[in-house]
Image (spheres, helix red, strand yellow):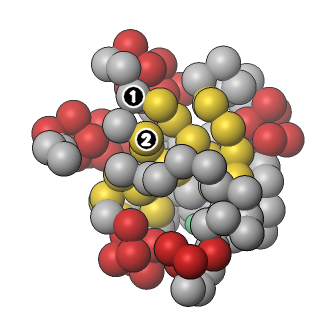
Amino acid sequence: MNVFFDVDYTLINMYGKLRPWVREVFQQLRLDGHTIYVWSGVGVRWPVIRQHHLEEFVADCYQKPLDDHHRRLPDLGVKVLPDFCIDDYEEIIAAFGGAVVRPYYWNDLLDLEMHRIYARISSHRR
Ligand SMILES: [Mg+2]
């Protein structure tokens, strides 16, 4: 599947720190044969991906449409359709499907949301 991850409060917190288990889950999703994309409402976030050394797992980064979601994809250069999205913003999941993630605002080494998200992706049938 084409799995699309949001950035702010999904992968990183307000300090720019990476959520626990992101790297491990990205690695496992690739091993499972999924393709990982990262998108953000504030632009293309390769710098964040590189800062956390995740570029080997990420096929591409896009800007995320914040309204008129499906129609805006071509304008934003999104070349593939999401099969499963992970976002702390429910509107994106309502538009494209996937799982809402609990927002990751502060540092929390005990945060296990990525484990739950991995299970959701793995059990999803198109
Ligand atoms: Mg977000």
Indicate which disc residue 96 carries: none
The response on whether ligand 1 sits within 8 Å of label 1 is no
Report the residue at 56% width, 57% height from top.
Answer: 6
Which of 63/7 is in front?
63
Q: Residue furthest top?
A: 31
The location of residue 125, given as percent across then percent down, is 14, 44
Quadrant in which ligand 1 is drawn: bottom right
The location of residue 61, given as percent across then percent down, is 70, 45
Report the residue at 47% width, 31% height from top.
Answer: 35
Quick check: marks 1 and 2 in contact, CB under 8 Å? yes
Disc 1, SS: loop
Residue 120 is left or right of residue 104, and the answer is left
From the image, tell me which residue sits under label 2.
2
The response on whether ligand 1 sits within 8 Å of label 2 is no
The location of residue 45, given as percent across then percent down, is 78, 49
First along the sequence among labels 1 and 2: 2
Report the residue at 39% width, 75% height from top.
Answer: 95
